[in-house]
Image: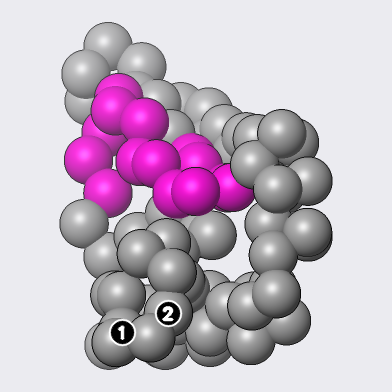
């Protein structure tokens, strides 16, 4: 969700949770996840990964604070929508 005047990655630290597909890594700039299935039918593990090199780069960015807030805000709204 890049906005005029912001870095292209602005607000994208966390993976998009709205369209997660099983057995596929859903990437975010810093945080990604994978929903694994067992035998293709039943939910298995949920794996969350943090890319520490990207996190370190983000913390050095001038837009870190507001980008992090936007990323978490987006994640919160996605969680509310998913429960409806």
Would you call the spot at circle 2 few (<14 residues within 10 Å), some (14-19), or many (20 or more)? Answer: few
Q: In which image quadrant can residue 12 be found?
A: bottom left
**Is 29 within the magenta?**
yes
- The residue under the point 27% across, 49% down is 20
Q: CA distance from mark 1 to mark 2?
A: 6 Å
Against 48, residue 29 (above or below) is: below
**Which part of the image, by quadrant, shows the C terminus?**
bottom left
Q: Quadrant of residue 64?
A: bottom right
Q: Nearer the viewer, residue 12 or 38?
A: 12
Picture coordinates of residue 74, whole percent (x, y): 44, 81
Image quadrant occupied by the N terminus: bottom left
Q: Nearer the viewer, residue 48 or 62?
A: 62
* Picture quadrant of residue 77: bottom left
Tell me which segment is drawn in magenta: 20-33
Q: Nearer the viewer, residue 84 or 54?
A: 54
Query: Residue 37 location, x and y as percent?
Result: 34, 24
One can see residue 81 in this view: no
Q: In the rendered image of this protein, does residue 53 appear above or below residue 4?
A: above
- Residue under label 2, please give it: 6
Residue 23 lies in the magenta-colored region = yes
Residue sitting farthest toward the front: 5
Q: Residue at x 50, y 42 (%)?
A: 32
Reading the image, the residue beneath label 1 is 3
């Amino acid at each position: 969700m890049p906005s005029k005047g912001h870095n292209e990655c602005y607000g994208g630290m966390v993976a998009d949770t709205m369209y997660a597909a099983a057995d596929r890594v859903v990437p975010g700039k810093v945080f990604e996840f994978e929903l694994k299935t067992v035998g293709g039918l039943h939910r298995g593990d949920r794996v969350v990964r943090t890319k520490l090199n990207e996190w370190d780069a983000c913390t050095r960015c001038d837009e870190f604070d507001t980008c992090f807030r936007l990323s978490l805000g987006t994640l919160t709204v996605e969680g509310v929508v998913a429960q409806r």
